[in-house]
Structures are given as structure tokens and as C-alpha cells.
Image: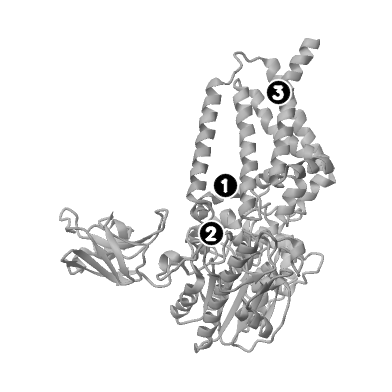
Amino acid sequence: MKIYAKKLLRCFLPYIVAPFILELIIESLNRKSVIAGFEYMIDSPLLFLFNMMIIMLTLSVASFFKREVFVFSSISIVWLIFGIVNFVILHFRVTPFSAVDFTLIKSAISVSGHYLSVLNIAMLVVAVAVIVFSIICLYRKAPYHNTWNHKRFAISVLSVFILSMAIVFIKSSSNSVQALATNYTNISEAYENYGFVYCFTNSIIDTGIAKPDDYSEESVKAVKDKLKKSKTKLKDNPNIIMIQLESFFDVDNVKGMSFSEDPLPVFHSLEENYSSGLLTVPTVGAGTVNTEFEVLTGMRQHDFGVCEYPYKTVLKSTASESVCNNLSKLGYKSHAVHNNEATFYGRNKVFSSLGFDSFTSKEYMNGITENPNGWSNDDIMSDEIIKTLDSTDGPDFTFGITVQSHGKYDVDTDINQKIKVSGAPAGMESQYSYYVNEIAEVDDMIGDLIDKLSKRDEKSVVVLYGDHLPSLDITVDELNNASLYQTQYVIWDNLGLKKEDKDIASYQLYPEVFNRLGIHEGLIDRYQQQTDENSEDYLSDLATLEYDLLYGENYAYNGSNPFEASDMTMGTDKVKIKDVKKTDDGYVVTGKGFTGYTEILFNGNKLKGEFIDDSHIRIDEESIEYDDSEDYISLEEAKEEEIAPEDIPNAFVAQFIDDDGIVLSTSDALPYKATSLD
């Protein structure tokens, strides 16, 4: 009996000790302190045990395999890697590692150069290689069971069952565990309070908007019936411009800091003379597109799953009510302008679901300069925004997204900063100095845009707001407004709107602006305008409408989604090839709208060339021959037969291709016979 007990103990002991050690290491990494990890274990023993049991459950899968040691070790390594990844991510942003980050890998890789040095990347590659090599060796060398019996299988099943029931019991009976369901607005605090393993696992399971308990056609109708059918009474059809300012906030709100000169003279002047206030956003230090989602849809990101990015989930396949779709009913054209990659967060696809008519990313801009951190400077934004207003005859909605003041901020530079900063938190002096001087240049761009709009013979409204606080390790105690989830907004106009200062949430911003302009078009828009945010049913009714529109039966719109993805074009100007001429050293393609990301194709093959200016590209090919074996196809025939421009034989096309080789757009084809070469 003693021998059997020892054997059983030897069998189960690793499944107890390993989860304990892993949980302690992971929580120490989550808190960036070994001492804090032990304190969490002592102060919150039930939560520590709950997280440990989740790890134990995943490890218990190994007991079903003959190569038990290999599977057990591999799962342990995965958990350890997750803990290390979370530790690294917390050094670059405030938001911890969650399951949704797997959907953002491509975006993360595209910006890794701004955060990691060549040495860092090399070390990362070596680390991955070592891990892979170790796993291969472990697979080959680790002991495994030669036999398998029903008794062992039964014990494994029983162990997993008991462990699962224990987890379910604690989850349903413990108030401290249940609290995560309602207290994850501050993601960083949630991970610290409830543990990395629990929160990360929850981010895998909890996605989308939970179906309301009373969801039905009647419940949706009941919400709609509370709303008045307000008619839009819009005067002057003003252009509406909203600009999301990357990591932008008023640094005067940091206690004890002073500056050699005001870094935000324009923004402060606008706050003094026009409507402004604090803006409560759903994220801090990162997660730009979640603030963006709230601003463009009027929906609340908190109603979605833990750490979820709707841009990477539901909006990839579902068209939604938005600023753009509501304004389109009034004859507006909608444009997005962003001096960063088009594919970042999948905006080149998602913006179509939100109803944008055009999207100008950095691939469609000329004259971009970069700051010391490698991000595009924002000075180009004012001209690009003006271009969108000039591109149509009617009123426009333009949504600008800046990037210059993006982290990281510990930039290794000897540049003599214009504005001197004093009183910054200890150890963060150089980071604040860099950040303050970057947002000072953003402020210059705002002033330039306002100046240009003031000189136009058009009415305009400009809404400026920060998407989240910068990743400067800011604590609540360091802020005058005592919230990490508040930035500032201001509304400039040349309509003579009355100044009304008000603190609001980012999902209330566009309905608030629309209400002041007399616009009452969308369901979410009217709900936000007419419902008292302090009422008992405000948030639950909003969640009901959100669920119905994005996941439910669309009862609010008689059973069908009235919104369709727009036929969005990339770039403000239509790109066109006008002619191709032979020169002494090759060819010259003439046209309009070219940038450094434009490539010329003939017969579907890329031609070697060099960008000259927005109207000319030099081609270095020795000869471009007309292929007599291919029948001539007119553009009309190609359209009738639905032949893509790049597949039309003996024709030139211009393609915009990003740094990852993704084709963003293709111009109309220019047949060889229509050029000077024929």
C-alpha cells in the first residue's frame, strides 16, 4: 500500500509543484517584482490557487499521452513564454498581453523597428531558435510510456473531471473570482488583481458582446420606442473633421512639471475659446483603435470581450452603423487620412465596413519626414486633410489619425530639444523631454490646419481629441485629474457655435457633436443624444442595441442589416497612367498620384524603375515589347468579362504595394496601343 501511495504521489506531485512554480514566476513577471509575486500569493491565496488550477488543468492534458514528459514540459514552456511575453509587452505599453494580441502579430511586426534594435531582434531570433532546438531534443530524449492501460486512462479522466469541477465551483461561488466580469475596464489593474493566467484565459473565451438575457424583438422595440423621431436640421452643411491625436494629452495635468515655454499654445487657446472637456477613453498606453472604434460608432468597447479589438473581430466581416454611414444620408462623403501603414490594425479593410469612401495612408503621400523614433511627422496631415475637402463638391467628413507622438519615448538621440522640461518623474526626464517636444510639433500642425480652414470659403467643424495617455509609466498620483483613462477634446468651428464645456466618454463624442449641429440620423446617434447617461438602463439598453446590430437579428432594422461595406478607394486622388515614352536610358511613365510606393506593371510583370515625382516614374527596362501572341482586349471588354486590370494583356497598370508586399490598390489599365510606344 505504501509503495502504491508513493507511486501515486510521484505521479501527481509534478502536476502540483510545476503549476505552483509557474504561477509564482508568471505573477512575479506580471508585477515586475519577485517580492510582489510572493505578496500576491499571500494576500490573495484563493485567486493565486485559482490561477494555479487553470495551469494545472492545461498540464493535465499530458497525462493522456505516452510522451507525457514531453507534452507536460511543452505546455509548461508555453505558459512560461506567455509570462515572459507579458513582461516584455508591459515595458512597451501599459496594456498587458491578451489573446487578441495573436490577431495583431502582423501589426506588431510592422512597428517592431520602432521599439527593438537590431541587437534586440537578433537576440529574439536566437532565443526562438534555442527554444525550438530544445523542444526537438526534448521530444527525442524524454522518456515515454511503453504501455497504456485502462486504469491509467481512468485516473487521468477522473483527475481532469475533479479539477474542472473545482474550477467551475470556485468561479461560481467566489466573489473575488466573479468580480473580473464587471471590473475589467482597467485592464492593467484587472491583470494585477485577478492574475495573468485567469485574465489571459478569459480573453480567449470572452469575445464579442454577450447576448442580453432578455434579448428579443420586443426588448429591442422597447428601447427604440423610448426614442423620439428627431429630424435633422443641419445648416450650412459644414465639413466635419475629427482628428485622433496619437498618445496626446495636456502635459500640464502632470503634477510638478514645468516647461520653458507652453508646448501646446494652440490647443490651450482652442480650449479657452471653444467647447472642450475631458474625454474618458477605453484604454491607456496602447489600443488606439478601441478609442477609434468608440468615436466612429458610438458603441462601448467595454461591452465586448476582455481586451477585444472589434477591428480584428466583428468589423472584419460586418458593416456597422457609424459616423460615415449616418452622414452619407445627408450627402456627405467620408475620408480617412493616416500617416502610417494602411494595413495597421487592418484599417484598409475595416474602414470599408464603417462606410468610408476613401482612405489615404502614408503609401499615398509624398513628402513625409520622420521623427527620431522613425514615426512619420504629422506636419503632412494638414495638407492631406485639405485635399480630401477639395476632392468633392459637396460636404465632407474627414477622419484624421496622427502618429508622430507614438511611443516608445526613450529615444537615443542627442538632438537639442527646443522646449526644456523640468519636474518630470524621476528616471523619466529624457522620455518626457522627447514626448513634450513631439506633441509641441503636433500642436503646430493643429494650428496650421485651423489657419488653412479659416481661410477657406466653407463652414467647418474640427474635433480634436487624444486617443489615450502615452506609455510613460504614468500613475494616478502623478495626475491632477486623477484618471489614467482621460484625455482632452476640443471642438473648433467657424459656425458660431456656443461654447459648452462638458466631460464625456469617447463613445458619446460624435453624438454630442452631431447634436450641437442638429444631426439626428442614426439609431445609436439618437440613443446617445436622448438617453440620460445616469439612468438605470442607459448601459444595458445600449448593449442591447449593440448586440442587435452586430451579432443579433437586426430587430431594430426590421430583420436585416441596412449597412453595406463601402466601395472604398485608396488615396484621395485617383491614380492614373497617362502615357509611356521611350528615352535614351529606358522609359518614363507619366501620370498623376504616384508615390514612392507605386510600382508599374506590364503584362502582369513588375518593371524595374524609380520614383521621380507624383507625375513621373522612370523605368530601367531595356525594352518593353508588345506581345503579338496575346489578343488585344479593350478596357470595355475587360470590364464586361471582369478581367482585373493587371491581367489585361499588353497593358500598363500602377500598383501601390506596402512594405510587406501587400497590394493596396491598382489603377485602371493603359493599353500599349494607347501609349507613345505604339
Question: Is 159 situated left or right of 634 in this image?
Answer: right
Q: Kindly identify the amino acid type of the residue bearing the numbered disc 2.
A: Asp
Question: What residue did someone put label 3 on?
Answer: 156
Kind of element beneath mark 2: loop
Residue beneath the point at 63% across and 78% down: 262
Locate the C terminus and report the quarter of the image it occupies: bottom left
Quarter occupied by residue 532 = bottom right
Question: What residue did someone put label 2 on?
Answer: 412
Mark toward the start of the polypeptide (2 vs 3): 3
Mark toward the start of the polypeptide (2 vs 1): 1
Residue 317 showing in the rendered view: no
Kind of element beneath mark 1: helix
Q: Position of residue 361 (x, y in %)?
A: 46, 66
Is mark 2 in CB contact (under 8 Å) with mark 1? no
Q: Kindly identify the amino acid type of the residue bearing the numbered disc 1.
A: Phe
Residue beneath the point at 25% across and 65% down: 618
Asked whether 383 or 411 is in front, the reply is: 411
Asked whether 148 or 194 is in front, the reply is: 194
Residue 660 showing in the rendered view: yes
Question: What residue did someone put label 1 on?
Answer: 102
Inter-mark Cα distance, 1 to 3: 31 Å
Inter-mark Cα distance, 2 to 1: 30 Å
Is mark 2 in CB contact (under 8 Å) with mark 3? no
